[in-house]
Image: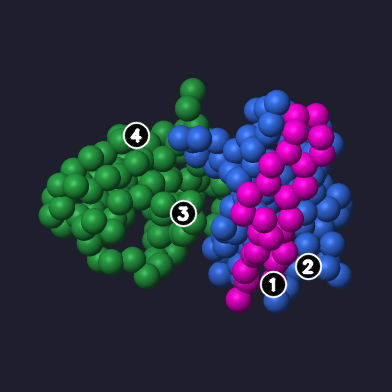
Chain colours: A green, B blue
Amino acid sequence: DTAVSQTPKYLVTQMGNDKSIKCEQNLGHDTMYWYKQDSKKFLKIMFSYNNKELIINETVPNRFSPKSPDKAHLNLHINSLELGDSAVYFCASSFGQGGKQPQHFGDGTRLSIL
Amino acid sequence: AQSVTQLDSHVSVSEGTPVLLRCNYSSSYSPSLFWYVQHPNKGLQLLLKYTSAATLVKGINGFEAEFKKSETSFHLTKPSAHMSDAAEYFCVVRSNDYKLSFGAGTTVTVRA
């Protein structure tokens, strides 16, 4: 009965490869997010979708492309992976896009670039 | 612009003693504020939230926080620490463009 689930949990790959991370929520939320947490545990928003529409698109390299096939899913595709992409990526979801409602987080995907 | 400062990067307490995690924010309007906890290899879990109702907010696991507008603070407290409280804690403020700004985090260790 996991609320926000991300796959894979760990991802180790070579520089230059293309990889995807999947996220699904079963909470009935209409807004989903991707965050990046660096090695110093600093969290920064990357993207947000509300009802499948992109509403937040931070200054992220265009190698990162989110895709929301429906309200319950938000996937993240990364092209031409670089060493600096190594981080933990968190998916989250909430009701509404206003930020007043708490966000529910997945357990993260630990991406390591060799 | 909104921002949040967690005044302590690391707090160490003995089991059974009080915990205080300090957070100051800056906001151009009445903010929404949250505290989240992150246990190792886990995602963030909401502890409590303030959204302009009562200034003293009670959360899960015995935590509470007090919103003080005059001091622009939202400190998190717990009367008696438990070993399971060892984790990373984030103070978060909602900005006026709907984004959340996260503090740098406070690592809590609990000594037996």
Q: Distance between the residues labelled 3 and 2?
A: 25 Å
Residue B94 position (above or below residue A2): below
Neighbourhood count class around disc 4 (C-alpha, 10 Å): few under 14, some 14–19, many 20 upward: some
Nearer-the-camera pick, A89 or A99: A89
Give the residue type at disc 3: Lys
According to the picture, the residue beneath numbered tag 4 turns out to be A9
The reply to whether the magenta stretch includes residue A8 is no
According to the picture, the residue beneath numbered tag 3 turns out to be A40
Q: Where is residue B89 in the image (x, y as percent from the top left)?
A: 62, 46
Quadrant the C terminus of chain B occupies: top right
Q: Which of marks 1 and 2 is in front?
A: 2
Precedes in sequence: disc 1 or disc 2 = 1
Badge 2 sits on which subunit?
A: B
Q: Are marks 1 and 3 on the same chain?
A: no
Badge 4 sits on which subunit?
A: A
B69 horizontally vs A56: left or right: right
Residue B32 position (above or below residue B59): below
* Point 83% across, 53% down: residue: B66
According to the picture, the residue beneath numbered tag 2 turns out to be B72
Q: How far apart are marks 4 and 3 (CA)?
A: 19 Å
Q: Distance between the residues labelled 1 and 3?
A: 24 Å
Q: In the rendered structure, which segment of residues is drawn in magenta?
A: B1-26
Neighbourhood count class around disc 3 (C-alpha, 10 Å): few under 14, some 14–19, many 20 upward: few
